Image (tube, rainbow, N blue to C red):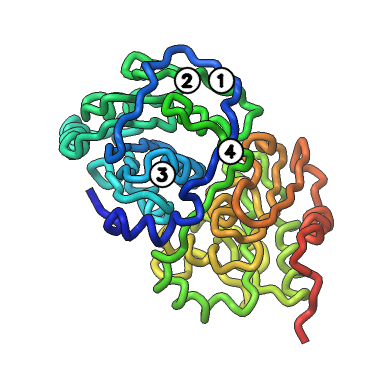
Amino acid sequence: MFPLLPSRQRREQTSGAYRGRRTSASPSLPALRLSRLEDEGPSHKILVVSPGDASEMVFASALMPLLRARYPRCEISMLCGPRSASIAALIPDVDAIEMTAGNSNALWRGRGALGSFAQSVVRVRKEHFDIAVLLSPEWRATLVATLAGARRRIGHAGGLGDRFLTDVIAAGREIRPVLHELTDLLAPLAIWKPELLRYQLNAAPLSSRRERFRLLLGSRPVSLRPFSAIRGESVDLKQWIRVAVELGRRGFDPLWIGSPSELNAVHRAAGSAAWRYVNKLGGGSSSDAAAAISLSHLFIGHDSSSLHLAGAFGVPVVGVYTPGQPMRRFPQGTGDSVMLSRGSPAGVTSRDILSVVDELPIAPRLQLV
């Protein structure tokens, strides 16, 4: 296990705003099977299992203050793959991170050796967790929590993993916001949805990177993510180039976000010496990308982990959904946000995107003199 800070010290630094918050009344929640509700005690240990990508890790951050308010003295750990562990380290109220063995997410994808799987189970079992909250119905994740000895294992219905759960929550509909679906998992612990759900990350662990990048990003960096994770849903790159040119005229410093191959496509399409590329900053790690995004004055892009990272840092976000899942994965962070939602990327122009940018209360039209 990789501790982040001593539990009490970490809670004082990151979770004071949530302590003692009263939540709203219980919603109507269908459940297939619930074990007997009981107070697990004031000092028990909770494991939140997230086999997904960085987006799921950002969404998971909304659960931690609710768990902490319900059990102020508990210890909360995240179990995730190495690729998303750097994001888990930014979640307030998380006391420690458990990573799967190996250099990849092989455990979750079924390609890992049996030895790596066993190592993960043994390491987690030593921590003697009382409760495991599983953010995905992926059966391998549920099996780890079971073999690790967690007494209560809470997860959504959805597959082979159901047999390993003590509390099975009915799967949500696709049109429901992700955060609402995840907080359903807390109902067996007598934790109900608050009136307002937001995900939030703490940029303090990135302080050294942020200080280094301040000199590299310009005075008013704006992050651009022109590629959708789903093939065929991206707005034409030429339109994004025009967006970047116009933002430069308005006094912003474009920073392109994406994979190395995607950013090479941007550079080939039309480059500017004043534009920055996230893979050229530092070592190109996910922590470097998170640090750069956290410094942005604005984020514009397709639905992605980068978009949700920006929102979790309080950066104003313009989300482009063409079509995506705007009702489910809209920006749900602490900063201002607006969306451009179309049934297809065809016909979406730079003017369309910039008109949505102008709806944000950050005066983006201001020219530097």
**Disc 1, SS:** loop
Q: Mark 1 and 4 residues: CB-CB less than 8 Å, in contact?
A: no
Residue type at mark 4 is Pro
Q: Mark 1 and 2 residues: CB-CB less than 8 Å, in contact?
A: yes
- Using the numbered discs, state the Cα–Cα distance from disc 4 to disc 2 in whole angstroms: 19 Å
Q: Relative to the observer, which residue lies in front, 265 or 181?
A: 181
Marked residue nearer the N-terminal end (4 or 3): 3
Q: Label 3 crowding class (10 Å Cα cut-off): few <14, some 14-19, many 20+?
A: many
Which residue lies under the disc numbered 4? 194
Marked residue nearer the N-terminal end (2 or 3): 3
Q: Which mark is residue 29?
A: 1
Marked residue nearer the N-terminal end (1 or 3): 1
Q: Mark 4 and 2 residues: CB-CB less than 8 Å, in contact?
A: no
Of discs 1 and 2, which sits in the foreground? 1
Q: Residue at x 46, y 18 (%)?
A: 158
Of discs 1 and 3, which sits in the foreground? 3
Q: Residue at x 67, y 41 (%)?
A: 233
Q: Relative to the observer, which residue lies in front, 87 or 170?
A: 170
Residue 211 picture location, percent across and down: 46, 77
Residue type at mark 3 is Arg
- Using the numbered discs, state the Cα–Cα distance from disc 1 to disc 2 in whole angstroms: 8 Å
- Using the numbered discs, state the Cα–Cα distance from disc 2 to disc 3 in whole angstroms: 21 Å
Q: Which mark is residue 169?
A: 2
- Using the numbered discs, state the Cα–Cα distance from disc 4 to disc 3 in whole angstroms: 14 Å
- Using the numbered discs, state the Cα–Cα distance from disc 1 to disc 4 in whole angstroms: 14 Å
Q: Quadrant of residue 98?
A: top left
Q: Relative to the observer, which residue lies in front, 256 or 141?
A: 141
Residue type at mark 1 is Leu
Q: Residue at x 57, y 23 (%)?
A: 172
**Disc 4, SS:** loop
Of discs 4 and 2, which sits in the foreground? 4
